[in-house]
């Protein structure tokens, strides 16, 4: 709910602050915002396409398919981010060639220059978020698992649940936090297999 309220508040704050700069700045901000929203929604649609494949692969325990799905999502995110960045970078040129007011083109160009560095990392973050959603568990350890799957690296994130299971499995009776080194050694033994 807080996320949705913030999504509603951001355009309000943007319009309020940009409107104080004048009508041309408001028009430029609105134009860039609408183009950016169109590209963002398109990127979301493309990146959400990887969710079912990853979910099915993880549910079936098919490690190879999960690896392919995560890597494909990251490549798609990189491509979508690059296309979005190039499209946004070309907007001032397109406006100038279509005969728009030079002042509007200047405002659009300054607005886009401020936003441009965030499009590619934003697309990659969205892809990782969707990969986390597909796992069905959004705790901190999921980025480790997704990265391990994507780059075919072993990795057992050790949280409280894993500590309890490994303590029982390897009969580690020492209390936490003193037993953490032995638990990590037990996790390393499982990784080696």
Image (cartoon, grey):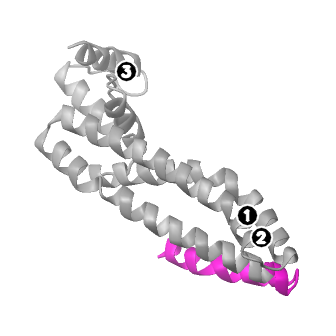
Residue shown at the point (43%, 44%) measured from the top left: 140
Secondary element at tag 3: loop
Pick the quarter of the image with the C terminus. Answer: top left
| Label 2 packing within 10 angstroms: few (<14), some (14-19), many (20+) | some
Whether residue 75 sits left or right of residue 66 in the image: it is right
Sooner in the amino-acid sequence: mark 3 or mark 1: 1
User: Can you tell which mark lies on residue 96?
Assistant: 2
Please, what is the dominant secondary structure of the magenta stretch? helix
- Front position in the image: 76 or 179: 76
- Front position in the image: 94 or 140: 94
The magenta stretch is: 1-25
Q: Which residue is mark 3?
A: 179
Q: Which residue is mark 1?
A: 93
Q: Are marks 1 and 2 in contact (CB under 8 Å)?
A: yes
Q: Give the Cα separation between the discs numbered 3 and 1.
A: 62 Å
| Label 3 packing within 10 angstroms: few (<14), some (14-19), many (20+) | some
Residue shown at the point (20%, 43%) measured from the top left: 58
User: Can you tell which mark lies on residue 102?
Assistant: none
User: Is-magenta flag for residue 82?
Assistant: no
Which of the 4 quarters of the picture holds residue 163? top left
Residue shown at the point (46%, 69%) measured from the top left: 41
- Front position in the image: 75 or 93: 93
């Amino acid at each position: 709910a807080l996320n949705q309220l913030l999504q509603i508040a951001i355009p309000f704050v943007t319009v309020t602050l940009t409107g104080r700069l004048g009508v041309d700045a408001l028009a430029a901000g609105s134009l860039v915002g609408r183009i950016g929203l169109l590209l963002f929604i398109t990127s979301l649609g493309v990146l959400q396409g990887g969710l079912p494949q990853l979910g099915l692969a993880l549910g079936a325990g098919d490690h190879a398919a999960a690896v392919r799905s995560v890597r494909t999502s990251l490549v798609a995110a990189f491509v979508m981010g690059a296309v979005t960045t190039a499209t946004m970078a070309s907007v001032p040129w397109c406006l100038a060639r279509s005969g728009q007011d030079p002042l509007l083109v200047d405002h659009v160009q300054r607005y886009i220059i401020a936003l441009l560095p965030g499009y590619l990392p934003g697309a990659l973050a969205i892809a990782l978020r969707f990969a986390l959603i597909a796992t069905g568990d959004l705790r901190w350890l999921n980025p480790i698992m997704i990265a391990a799957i994507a780059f075919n690296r072993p990795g057992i994130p050790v949280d409280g649940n894993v500590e309890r299971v490994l303590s029982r499995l390897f009969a580690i009776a020492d209390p936490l936090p003193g037993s953490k080194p032995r638990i990590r050694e037990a996790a390393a033994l499982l990784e080696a297999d």
